[in-house]
Image (cartoon, coloured by chain):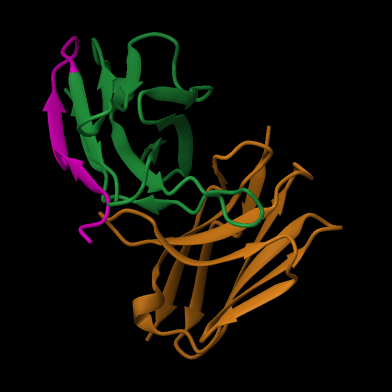
């Protein structure tokens, strides 16, 4: 089955700086890679996703890049704000129609 | 659109009791997934269901755990004879099941049910 590794586990940045979170996946059949943001006591919320026929996708301050050859994808958040502080999860679809999640990154944006 | 509704939000059970967690998918969604999240860990897949049908239960423990998604009503995750290790947040997600162009379902998660076993 699919295995998704996520790094770093914790990340602290100054407000206004950029944050980058990286994930690798094992199943070459994976074709869908979403990113979720989870705030304390809440459920994961989809913030951006990318499919394997695209190398990069951007939505305002958030962008995701995908390298199928190397089997890794990354989340980029620019001009970080305190409200970006949360746990971020990457996921891969694998060969089944269910998502395998990474272990999460606790992002803290320092004012 | 009320989103994915889970209840109860918090549930406390003593060892040996039963826990029932309910999930109503988003309107128009016919696919339901259950995930478990242990404290400070990621989300682990448990089971994937369509109406009246279990599609994939490869992540669900063989004993004490069961799930259903009847023709009418919410999906139910049932845990019999709970033990302390069952304490976790249980998240339900729903999807349309159409899978988009590449066949993968976009999941929308509920707020979760937090089970505490004393």
Depth check, front residue: B93 or B28: B28
Is B113 above or below relative to A70? Answer: above
Per the rendering, the colour in which chain B appears is green
Task: Measuring from the top left, give residue A8's x and y in whole percent.
Answer: 60, 60
Depth check, front residue: B71 or A74: B71
Which region of the structure is painted magenta? Answer: B1-18
Q: Name, please, the residue furthest toward the right.
A: A69
The residue lying at 30 percent from left, 39 percent from top is: B89
Q: Main secondary structure of the magenta part?
A: loop
* Rendered image quadrant of residue A99: top right
Residue B12 part of the magenta segment = yes
Is B107 above or below relative to B86? Answer: below
Task: Measuring from the top left, give residue A77's x and y in whole percent.
Answer: 54, 79
Is B45 above or below relative to A45? Answer: above
Q: Is residue B110 left or right of residue A27?
A: left
Per the rendering, the colour in which chain A appears is orange
Depth check, front residue: A2 or B54: B54
Q: Is residue B85 left or right of residue A31?
A: left
Q: Is residue B107 left or right of residue B80?
A: right
């Amino acid at each position: 089955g699919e295995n998704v590794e996520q790094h770093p586990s914790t990340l602290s940045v100054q407000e206004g700086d950029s944050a980058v979170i990286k994930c690798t996946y094992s199943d070459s059949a994976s074709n869908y890679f979403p990113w979720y943001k989870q705030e304390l006591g809440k459920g994961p919320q989809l913030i951006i996703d990318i499919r394997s026929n695209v190398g990069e996708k951007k939505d305002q301050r958030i962008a995701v890049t995908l390298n199928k050859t190397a089997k890794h994808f990354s989340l980029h958040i620019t001009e970080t704000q305190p409200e970006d502080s949360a746990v971020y999860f990457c996921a891969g679809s694998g060969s089944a129609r269910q998502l395998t999640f990474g272990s999460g990154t606790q992002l803290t944006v320092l004012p | 659109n009320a989103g994915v509704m889970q209840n109860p939000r918090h549930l406390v059970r003593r060892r040996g009791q039963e826990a029932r967690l309910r999930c109503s998918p988003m309107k128009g969604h016919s696919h339901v997934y259950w995930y478990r999240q242990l404290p400070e860990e990621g989300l682990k897949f448990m089971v994937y269901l369509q109406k009246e049908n279990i599609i994939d239960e490869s992540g669900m423990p063989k004993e004490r755990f069961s799930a259903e998604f009847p023709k009418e009503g919410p999906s139910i995750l049932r845990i019999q004879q709970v033990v302390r290790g069952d304490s976790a947040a249980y998240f339900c997600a729903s999807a349309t099941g159409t899978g988009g162009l590449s066949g993968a379902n976009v999941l929308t998660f509920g707020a979760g049910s937090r089970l505490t076993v004393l």
